[in-house]
Amino acid sequence: LNTRWYLLQTLQEHHFIFTLNSACLLLTSIVGRLWAMFYLVVFVVFPRYNAFASRGHQDVFIGCVLGHVVVFALSAQWMVKLMWNGPKAFLTFTPGESGACNLNLKAKAQ
């Protein structure tokens, strides 16, 4: 994500590195956050409920599940922001346009 920000600040025209970086960001965001959080809650945390309950730590179990759900929701919200203008705008650098998904771009006074 930091590399994408740097490219948004320094590129004057589209370069294949921008597309490669954006594709890697998209893939790692989906696999590393969205899929992993879902997998951890469903296949790792939920099956261990009895271990928590046997020690009287249901509050820890609920905190663990809620923490994973919050990270999942924030990651999904960030993915929506990144993909708001569609995959073409996300993968292609367009100088001076918000279509490049530059969330730091300031609106021009009209």
Image: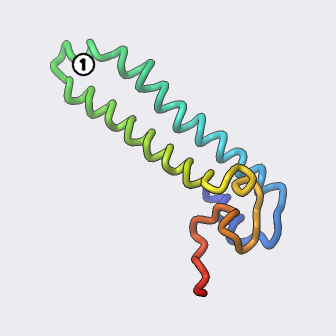
Using the image, determine if residue 46 lies above or below residue 21: above
Q: Position of residue 63 (x, y in %)?
A: 27, 34
Q: Nearer the viewer, residue 93 or 11?
A: 93
Name the quadrant containing residue 17. bottom right
Quarter placement of the C terminus: bottom right
Q: Amino acid at mark 1?
A: Phe
**Residue found 76% across the figure and 62% down from its top:** 93
Name the quadrant containing residue 90. bottom right
Q: Secondary structure at mark 1?
A: helix
Q: Position of residue 96 (x, y in %)?
A: 71, 74
Name the quadrant containing residue 7. bottom right
Quarter placement of the N terminus: bottom right
Judge the density around disc 1: few (<14), some (14-19), many (≥20) Cα neighbours within 10 Å. some
Q: Position of residue 87 (x, y in %)?
A: 71, 49
User: Which residue is denoted by mark 1 in the rendering?
Assistant: 52
Using the image, determine if residue 73 lies above or below residue 38: below
Using the image, determine if residue 13 lies above or below residue 44: below
Q: Residue furthest bottom?
A: 110
Q: Position of residue 69 (x, y in %)?
A: 38, 36
**Residue found 70% across the figure and 51% down from its top:** 22
Using the image, determine if residue 19 lies above or below residue 32: below
Q: Is residue 66 left or right of residue 58?
A: right
Q: Is residue 104 left or right of residue 56?
A: right
Q: Is residue 37 left or right of residue 69?
A: right
Q: Nearer the viewer, residue 72 or 24?
A: 72
